Image: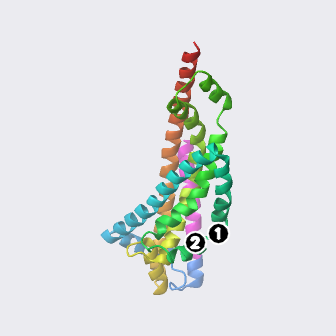
Amino acid sequence: MRKVKKIIKSAAVLLFWLFIWQIISIIISNDLLFPSPLRVFERLFELLREINFYITVLTSLLRIAAGVVSALTAGVLLAVLSSAVPFVHDLLSPFMSVVKSTPVASFIFLLLLWIGRDVMPAVIAAVILLPVVWTNMETGIKQTDRNLLELAAAYKMKTSAKVRYIYLPSVMPYFVSALKSSTGIAWKAGIAAEVLALPVVSIGKYIFESKMYLQTTELFAWTVATIVISAAIEKLLVFATDKLSDGITGKYREKGTMDINDRIC
């Protein structure tokens, strides 16, 4: 029943904003400046019937996903290294602060001088995501229960077992938090990079061309598609990571405690 109420509430909110959109379009009364929701969704459904739409979306998704995976891998490895060696933390902190403070557009224009336009969205997504992953993972590692680590050391638990049963349950919530909070940002930054870099097959290229040729309905349709895809990705990630986190923190923590207890006994 609660789930039904939540769906009804979300639908009501959506209808409210669609109504506001329709009112504004009626007031402006110019599709070139502000098309109506009906016109936009008609064009969106036309796009959904074209195979090229799916090729474009999949290509953009794969590009940005490559950047996200790269950032996750690099962020985890750097967090492990900087947690083990404090001097590495001191070296990385200024760089991460600069990355977080620099506007995305500045990175895009700078990187356009050095790398190809087809890999630009992946690089931008990775650059935006890296500081968040590194910060969260390092915090998770440092927050690991020291009593458990001392107990594991006292009973000579293997490094692989400590990682699996002590460190992993500790850092998993921080990893999930980083993924949830920054994947949507990485997606939007990747699309912005496509708009400026104009890879041959990309959502950003269609958005840019729609703006250039004053195809406002087309521009709105691609924008709505981008928003829906972003929301779907975030929902899927939240569901998948929550399930994974619950499984790891529950099963591994319990198994790790049992393993240490077995050694004590």
Q: Are marks 1 and 2 in contact (CB under 8 Å)?
A: yes
User: Residue 182: x, y in percent?
Assistant: 57, 57
Label of residue 167 in the image: none
Residue 185 in sight in this render: no
Amino acid type shown at disc 2: Phe
According to the picture, the residue beneath numbered tag 1 turns out to be 102
Q: Is residue 57 left or right of residue 187?
A: left
Quarter holding the N terminus?
A: top right
Q: Residue at x 59, y 78 (%)?
A: 24
Q: 4 or 89, which lies in front?
A: 89
User: Residue 13: x, y in percent?
Assistant: 59, 60
Furthest residue to the left? 51
Residue 129 in sight in this render: yes
Mostly what secondary structure, the magenta segment?
Answer: helix
Within the magenta stretch, is there residue 263? no
Label of residue 107 in the image: 2
Spatial separation of the CA atoms under disc 1 and disc 2: 7 Å
* Range of magenta residues: 1-23
Q: Earlier in the sequence, mark 1 or mark 2?
A: 1
Q: Give the secondary structure at mark 1.
A: loop
Q: 177 or 262, which lies in front?
A: 262
In this picture, is 61 found above or below 33?
A: above
User: Residue 148: x, y in percent?
Assistant: 63, 27
Amino acid type shown at disc 1: Thr
